[in-house]
Every structure is written in C-alpha cells, then in structure tokens.
Image (cartoon, rainbow, N blue to C red):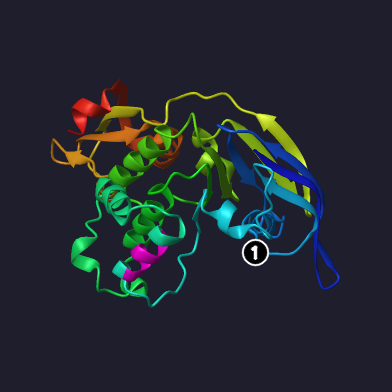
Amino acid sequence: MIRFENVGKDFRKNRVLDSVHLAVELGERIALIGSNGAGKTTLIRCLLGEYTHQGTVTIDGKEPRSERTQVLGKVGFVPQLPPPLKMPVGQLVSFAAAVCRTDAGRIHAVARRLGLDVEPILARPFNRLSGGMKQKLLIAIALGRDAQVLVMDEPAANLDPEARHIFFALLAERLEKTTMIISSHRLDEVAPLVNRVVEMDMGKIVLDDRVAEESKLSALFQVRLTLARADVAIARTLVAWQFADRADGIEWHGQVSGPDRLRFIGMVSRYVGLLSRIEMKEVDPAVVLQ
C-alpha cells in the first residue's frame, strides 16, 4: 500500500530524514510518534508529495510527487493547524470536492454528523470560523471522499466529546478499506485509535511495534461519578466533558467514547481524593445517541 524506501531529506546541511524504510498495509492504523523535530512532519509531507527527497515514496505503486493528481485524490489529510484560508466555506468545499472527484453533498453530510451545519456558513471566510468548526470542516473534507489513505495530525484535538465520538465512529466505518497514519508527539492521545506504533527520533525509525486493540472505535461507555463533596474545579471539567449534574454537584452522569477512556480516566485521576465511586458500562451507541 504505502512504501518508504531509503527516504532521506536534507534542509541545508541538516539531515531531517535518514534512510527511512517503512511499509504500511491496507487497514493498518499507524501512530506516528516522536518529539518535535523527530522528522514526523517531514515524512508526512514527503508522503503528500510536497517535498523532493532521496529514495522513493509510493502509494499503490504511484509516486505522490510526480503523479499528484492520481495519488492525492485517494488521500485525505487533516492538519494539526488549520490553514489561514480567507476562501469562503462554500468555495472551499466545492474546490475540495472537485479535486478529489466527489460530491460536495458528501462533505456536507459528514459535517452534519459531526455537528456542523455547513449551509448557514457557506459565505463565511474559513479563517473566521472557530477552532472547532475549522476542525470539523477539515475532517469532513478528508472523510467525504473515497480515500484509501487518511493522514491526520492530532485530528480530534479541537472537538467536543460528542463530536469526538462521532469522529471515532466515522473512522470505524472505514477500518476494512482505509490505511490511517495519525501523527502525534504523545502516544497516550492516539494509542486507542491505532494497531501499530512507529516512533521516530533524529530522522530515523527507532520503534515499530504492534499494539493490542482494547476497544472498538465506535464503543461508548455510560459513566457515573460520585464525589465525596461538591467541588468547583472538577465540576468545571466534567461540564466540559458534557456531563450532567444529578445531585447538587455530588453525582455526575455522562458518556465517554471507547478511545477516550484512558484520556478520561487520566483527567479524573487528578481529583482522586474527591472520588468515592466511578462506574463505566459499555452501551449501544445506536440507542444512546439516537
């Protein structure tokens, strides 16, 4: 599917990629991790055909740099930082749909599932949207096509909990026919989404390992928290997770998506002295979210 063979890249006299060899098959979900400067972004830009480089990079045998039209129509990309585009939303969606030969209606449909109605903002410049709206639209553009490869950089960072769950469910629908590369500098943020971890350091791959899949991407958990006493700080945090206060700040109910379980537990662990009980039960998303 994707092949990096002896890939090297220099910026002036700095070696940024150093003889990278990597093969990624259809259906694999890769966590591409490493500290800032490890080479992750440069490797992705080579995959997207944005940089010249030594060695070869291919997607289904085609080179992204020299065969951009054929290759990039099959690739969906969600950047970490939204581009500062002044283009109106409607024009951006139409342009993206034309480039990847899809129907703009598919992009609108994915955006609606994520909680973003595109129709009222078609005339608004992209750079005037909120951070969450930008992220939802970029995800909709990436997923609103028949992409065989999804390349994502911290894709759920600006999404609210409900949108995160929908995003994970959208990814789950593509597991059999899509290769995913998710870049992050923190493994704990992306570990539940992937089945393979590739770590980079100093332009080299220093770790390539399989990981166990503990939960389906579409899983949803009903959570109940009981506190020893009401507390403003944890209340503010739970409200941000869209939990509901059921007993004067003492009992809280909400839902957490499967891939967000570790992230949620890490958050509440900061308030362990206040916790007297926590229950997590897997439920049917189709019933809870209907």
Q: Where is residue 15 in the image (x, y as percent from the top left)?
A: 83, 62
Kindly indicate the quadrant of the structure image that contains residue 138: bottom left
Q: Name the magenta segment's main secondary structure.
A: helix
Q: Where is residue 41 in the image (x, y as percent from the top left)?
A: 64, 58
Q: Give the range drawn in magenta.
A: 91-96
Residue lying at the far left of the rendered structure: 247
| Vertical order, 287 against 80 (above or below) | above
Q: Is residue 105 visible?
A: yes
* Element carrying mark 1: loop
The quadrant of the picture occupied by the C terminus is top left
Q: Nearer the viewer, residue 277 or 214?
A: 214
| Vertical order, 193 against 133 (above or below) | above
Kindly indicate the quadrant of the structure image that contains residue 39: bottom right
Q: Which of 103 and 148 is in front in this view?
A: 103
- Residue in the image at 64% along x and 64% along y: 50
Residue 92 is left or right of residue 69, and the answer is left
Q: Where is residue 267 in the image (x, y as percent from the top left)?
A: 41, 42
Q: Which of 122 and 212 is in front in this view?
A: 122
Q: Is residue 233 visible?
A: no
- Residue in the image at 33% along x and 39% along y: 165
Mark 1 belongs to which amino acid? Glu
* Numbered disc total: 1
Q: Position of residue 144 (x, y in %)?
A: 37, 49
The verdict on residue 94 being magenta is: yes
Residue tagged 1:
50
